[in-house]
Image (cartoon, rainbow, N blue to C red):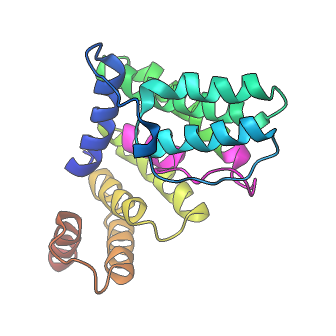
Amino acid sequence: MIDPSRWLVLFWSVAVLLSSDHAVAEDVSTLGQVNFQVSATAPAQENFNRAVAMLHSFWYERLDDAFSKVSGDDPLCGIAYWGLAMSRRELSAWVALVEGERDEAKRQMTKAAELEDSTEKNPVTPGPIIPGREQLADLLLAAMESSAALREFETTLRSAPNRFNGLYGAGKAARLSGDKDKARTHFAKLLEVSSGANSERAELQDAKAFLKSN
């Protein structure tokens, strides 16, 4: 299973999408400052920065309009279509899982991960809050497919090494799939890269407990 903090983020996002009563603050000045330079007209650039700020602030219900406005301002701004695809597919995958459509959830998240993989070397592509393939791994864990989840966590770690959530997820997936050697490797690495960090975090305590008994 996914650790509680990540479930809170993911399910809060799904709840936002499904709730008709959710009201988003209209004052965009409350968003953080984002400045990702892309090949676009000045109005499209401004709107793109605003759209990415919304993404980072989990304003999912506004993303479709926000990225559509970018492409409307500049139809040649390819990264606007990347934003639309990523925001739609990742959230749609979690909605499908919550609604019991496991195969559709995996299909949507796999597509999102493949899209992100195809753009990861673009120097102007905004860095994801949680990589698409790591989200796919989380989804597979939630679907009780630990071996498949382990493969995806390890794929993510090759392109984004030493991510805390990636290492913990890989260790947990390995443990659940019965691969104690890999679980030890990933948990040990997690503790190594987290030395000096808050040792009260549940993930670190879990890793320590596993290593102590295995």
Name the foreground residue: 211 vs 199: 199
Q: What is the x, y in percent for residue 109?
A: 51, 32
The quarter holding residue 99 reads top left
The quarter holding residue 80 reads top right
Q: Residue furthest top?
A: 20
Residue 132 visible to an observer of this rendering: yes
3 is within the stretch colored magenta: no
Residue 100 visible to an observer of this rendering: no
Q: Residue furthest right?
A: 76
Above/below status of 93 relative to 34: above
Q: What is the x, y in percent for residue 197?
A: 27, 80
**On-image quarter of the C terminus:** bottom left
Q: What is the x, y in percent for residue 205?
A: 16, 71
Q: What is the x, y in percent for residue 115?
A: 66, 37
Q: Residue furthest bottom?
A: 196
The quarter holding residue 194 reads bottom left
Q: Is residue 35 left or right of residue 124?
A: left
The magenta stretch is 117-140
Q: Residue at x 80, y 29 (%)?
A: 74
Q: Is residue 48 left or right of residue 56?
A: right
Above/below status of 100 relative to 87: above
Q: Is residue 41 left or right of residue 109?
A: right
Q: Residue at x 34, y 60 (%)?
A: 179
Name the foreground residue: 192 vs 201: 201
119 is within the stretch colored magenta: yes
Q: Residue at x 42, y 34 (%)?
A: 59
**On-image quarter of the N terminus:** top left
Name the foreground residue: 45 vs 192: 45
Above/below status of 95 relative to 80: above
